[in-house]
Image: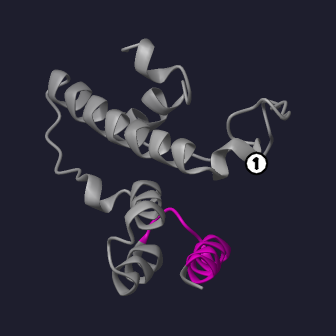
Amino acid sequence: MPVKGFRLCADAYAGDLAPFLGVLKGIPKVLTLYRQHGGNYFSSRLTKDCHAIKKSAKQYVFEHEQLKKALAGLGIESSIELNNHLPYLLTAYILEGEPAFRQMVSNILRCPVLGLKGRLYHLRKLMLKRL
C-alpha cells in the first residue's frame, strides 16, 4: 500500500480493493466508533471551499490509479473507469459543471451502491448546486 497518498482516507485502499477479492457481507451491529471534531477533514467546514474540493478530486484520481495498479499486480482484470466513480463525478460537477446535469442525474440513478434514500439525497444536493 502506498502510505503517503493514503494519509486521508486510509481505509480507501482496502475498501476499494475488497469487492475484487471476495464476497462482501454486511454486519448489522456497529463494530467501531468514529470521533468527529472540527479538525476532522470530513466533518469540518473546510470541505466546502474550492481548494478542499480540488484536493478531493485529486485524491479520487489517486485512489483510482492505485486501485488499477493493485488489481494489475494481483492479476485481476478490470474495466474500472473514473467516469463511473460517482464521488469523483460529483466533485467534477461542482468544480467544472461537467459532466452535464442530465448525465449526473443518470449517474446518480444508476449508482449500484445507493439505495433510494441515497439517490434522493444526491439528487437533492445536485439540484441545490444547480440553483
Position of 14 with respect to 28 (left or right) is left
Q: Residues within 10 Å of mark 1 (few under 14, many from 20)?
A: few
What residue sits 37% from the left and 35% below the top?
A: 63
Q: Which residues are magenta?
A: 111-129
- Residue 116: in magenta span: yes
**The quarter of the displayed image where residue 8 is located:** top right
Farthest residue toward the front? 50
Q: Quadrant of the C terminus?
A: bottom right
Position of 99 with respect to 33 (left or right) is left
- Give the main secondary structure, helix, strand or loop, of the magenta stretch: helix
Of residue 51 and residue 64, the one placed in the foreground of this image is 51
Give residue 90's position: percent from left, percent from top.
Answer: 46, 63
Query: Which amino acid type corresponds to the residue marked 1 in the rendered image?
Result: Pro
Considering only vertical position in the picture, is 89 above or below 49?
Answer: below
What residue sits 58% from the left and 83% below the top?
A: 127
Whether residue 22 appears in this view of the structure is no
- Residue 62: in magenta span: no
Position of 17 with respect to 65 (left or right) is right
Instruction: Report the residue marked by disc 1.
Output: 28
Give residue 122's position: percent from left, percent from top.
Answer: 59, 72
Whether residue 109 appears in this view of the structure is yes
Of residue 29 and residue 68, the one placed in the foreground of this image is 68
Considering only vertical position in the picture, is 52 above or below 97?
Answer: above
Give residue 92's position: percent from left, percent from top.
Answer: 39, 60
Give residue 97's position: percent from left, percent from top.
Answer: 39, 72
- Tag 1 secondary structure: loop
**The quarter of the displayed image where residue 3 is located:** top left
What residue sits 80% from the left and 42% below the top?
A: 29
Q: Quadrant of the N terminus?
A: top left
What residue sits 58% from the left and 76% below the top?
A: 129
Task: Report the colour scheme.
Answer: one colour
**The quarter of the displayed image where residue 105 is located:** bottom left
